[in-house]
Each structure stands twice: as structure tokens, then as C-alpha cells.
Image (cartoon, grey):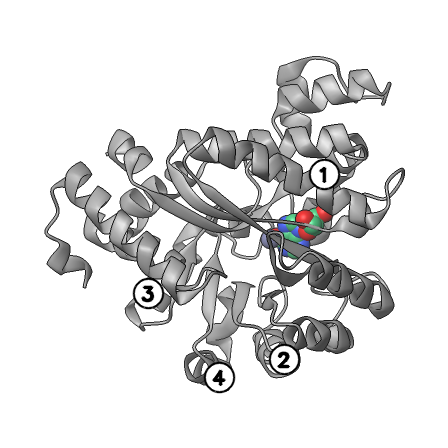
Amino acid sequence: MEKLIRKLPKTELHLHLDGSLRVKTVLELAEDREIELPTADQKGLAEYLQVSEDCDSLAEYLEKFDLPLKVMQTEKALTRVTYELLEDAAWENVKYLEIRFAPLLLTEELRPAEVVEAVLAGVEKGENKYELQANIILCCMRHQDPSRSIETAQLAVDYSDQGVVGLDLAGDEANFPPEEHEEAFKLAAGAGLHRTVHAGETAGAKNVKKAIDYLNAERIGHGIRSKEDKETLETIKEAGVTLEICPTSNLHTNAVTDLEQHPIREYYEAGIPITVNTDNRTVSNLTLSQEYLMLYREFGFSLAEIQELILSGIKAAFISDKEQEKLITEFKSEFETIAGIDNKILE
Ligand SMILES: O=c1[nH]cnc2c1ncn2[C@H]1C[C@H](O)[C@@H](CO)O1
Ligand SMILES: [Zn+2]
């Protein structure tokens, strides 16, 4: 099953660049720029970059991004880590991915536009080498002043014809509400950019409703607490919003205390559109295939259901209907070849 899942064509829509650096690369980039590391030993560094067993909040989890952000402050580093992420995705047959990061956290030496261009260069390099497509989502950060979010939205608009497809709001949810960033999301929507918002992860369902009502979110990052409020669930259904579910990450941020508490199966059964994602590959020491394997083993998702979840990722992707249709056709044909599954199951 493990091999089979790795071979399946996949999509990943919720993936942070700064949480997904290779450990060896962090080591090399730090050496290049003489950045002090907690340890020079690769195994020790891997442990340092990963979230610890006893992490008890999202705020603590977010500290894991400090070191990766430090080593990513040059064009060369940004292009490299982006390219490597595409390479890692290609290794497990992720055919379409959306990579997100906050450009304004990467401006120690670069201008925001240079940050975006360096990442886009990495995407181009990866797309030329591997058979996959990647688009970019720019993150506004909750703890920053709303004017910084407007700046991020404008940047996304400026690069919307070069592979930036959406705007996100990330960071410490419990302490910063979404509605303050309304103007940035209005700007993005007005220019035809897509919107996704981290909400209902470590704060209540109301944040999900606010993200949809105020920020016009088409997708919600996590949204696992939506079930706490009936009205929120109705809004999700009415607005046709998709939840970007990242089960292991939710365990690591203590958004759920154990996997049995995770509502993924419940949402799936209720017909809420969901996708499966890693969130942060390095912080959670995780691949997308491992995440699907966990769903198969722990939540009883069958192969046909896994394929349906993968296709749900295409339907929620920030690409045109025509591109979605093309990917769906390709995926269905690959599913058939790989698993010999009757496509009727997938209709
Ligand atoms: O799971 C998350 N919730 C909220 N914010 C997050 C999560 N994972 C990463 N981030 C933050 C930390 C990164 O520096 C930022 C942009 O990728 O997004
Ligand atoms: Zn996230």
C-alpha cells in the first residue's frame, strides 16, 4: 500500500515553503552565511527543526520557523529551497502543488519583489526538470499590522500573471482575529486573486465564518473546529468552501489532542469538500504519502476514497476550470493504470 500511495498522482494545496526545507540544506545554507546553528550535527539539527512531542500550542510550533527563515534571506537560497521542494514533491508523484510563504518575513536583505521572483525562479527550474506544476500563494501574517497585509496583497496582484494565484492569512490564530485584514483580501479579490485563510485551527469556529464572510475565503486552512458551530458548517456548505486538512500538523500544534479526535472522517462523511495536506514537511517530518497512508491505516480511508480526496484537491485548486478538467482526466487515467480501479467509483 505504501508504494502504491507514493505512485498515485497527487495534489498538495497547503504547504509552507519555510516549514519544508531539507535539513541538509539548512545546514549548508547556514554554513555559507555563517549563521550560528544549535548543532552542526545533521541528526541533531533534524530534531531541532522538528516539532517536539511536548509542543502544546501553535505559538510554540511557530518558533520552528525562526531558523529556516534566517537561512532563506538570499535569492540563491530561496531559489534552491523552492526547487528542492518541487523535487521532493515530484519524488512522490505530486503533480500539482501550491506553495505558500510570507514574503515580508524574508526581507532582511531583499526587496519583497525580489523574494517573490527568487521563489518563482525555483518553481520554473523545478517545472522544467520534473513533470509537475506549482503555483504560489502569498501569506499575510496575523501578528503584523494590517497595512503589511495590504502590501502583501499588492505584491500578489503584481505577480498574478507569473504564478502567484492566491492570498493567505497565517500565524498565531488565538491572539489575532482575521477581520482586521479585510482590506487586503478585498484588494486581492478585486484583482481576481484567490483567497484561503488559516482559521478554526487553534481558535473557534467563528473565525472560519469570519474568514468566509469578511475575507471572502474560498478555502480554509485547517478549519477543523468548524463543527463546533452549526451556522459555520452551513456557511461552509453554502459558500462551497473547501477545507485544507492537515491531520498530523493538527496533532503537532495540539489543535487536536490525539488523532482519534480528528474530525476528518466526520467532515468527509458529511460531504464537506476536504483536501489532504502536510502543512510543513520538515516541522512535522512528513511526506504527503505518509499522510495518506496514515488515513488508510488509522481512519479506514479506502483506496477509492483516497483517490476521491486527491481529485477534491484538483477541484479546489486555484487554477482555471479548463486546467482542472485536464488534470482530472490525467489523474483518472493514471489511477486506472496504477491501481486498476474502475473509474466509475470516482465519478
Ligand atoms: O499551521 C499553521 N498555522 C498558522 N500559521 C502557520 C502554520 N504553519 C506555518 N505557519 C506560518 C509560519 C510561517 O512562517 C508562515 C508563512 O509560511 O506561516
Ligand atoms: Zn498552514
From the viewer's perspective, tell me whether residue 238 is left or right of residue 303.
Answer: right
Kindly state the secondary structure of the residue where label 2 is placed. helix
Does residue 185 appear in the picture of this structure? yes
Q: Name the N-terminal-most of marks 4 and 1.
A: 1
Q: CA distance from mark 4 to mark 3?
A: 16 Å
Residue drawn at point x = 69 percent, y = 12 percent: 41
Q: CA distance from mark 3 to mark 2?
A: 22 Å
Mark 1 against mark 2, which lies toward the viewer? 1
Picture coordinates of residue 26 (x, y %)?
Answer: 70, 24
Q: CA distance from mark 1 to mark 3?
A: 38 Å
Kindly state the secondary structure of the residue where label 3 is placed. helix
From the viewer's perspective, tell me whether residue 175 is left or right of residue 221.
Answer: right
Residues marked 1 and 3 touching at CB (< 8 Å): no
From the viewer's perspective, tell me whether residue 96 is left or right of residue 28.
Answer: left
Q: Name the N-terminal-most of marks 2 and 4.
A: 2
**Circle 1 sits on which residue?**
118
Residues marked 4 and 3 touching at CB (< 8 Å): no
**Circle 2 sits on which residue?**
210
Task: Please identify the quarter of the rendering in which residue 53 is found.
Answer: top right
Q: Amino acid at mark 2?
A: Lys
Q: Amino acid at mark 1?
A: Ala
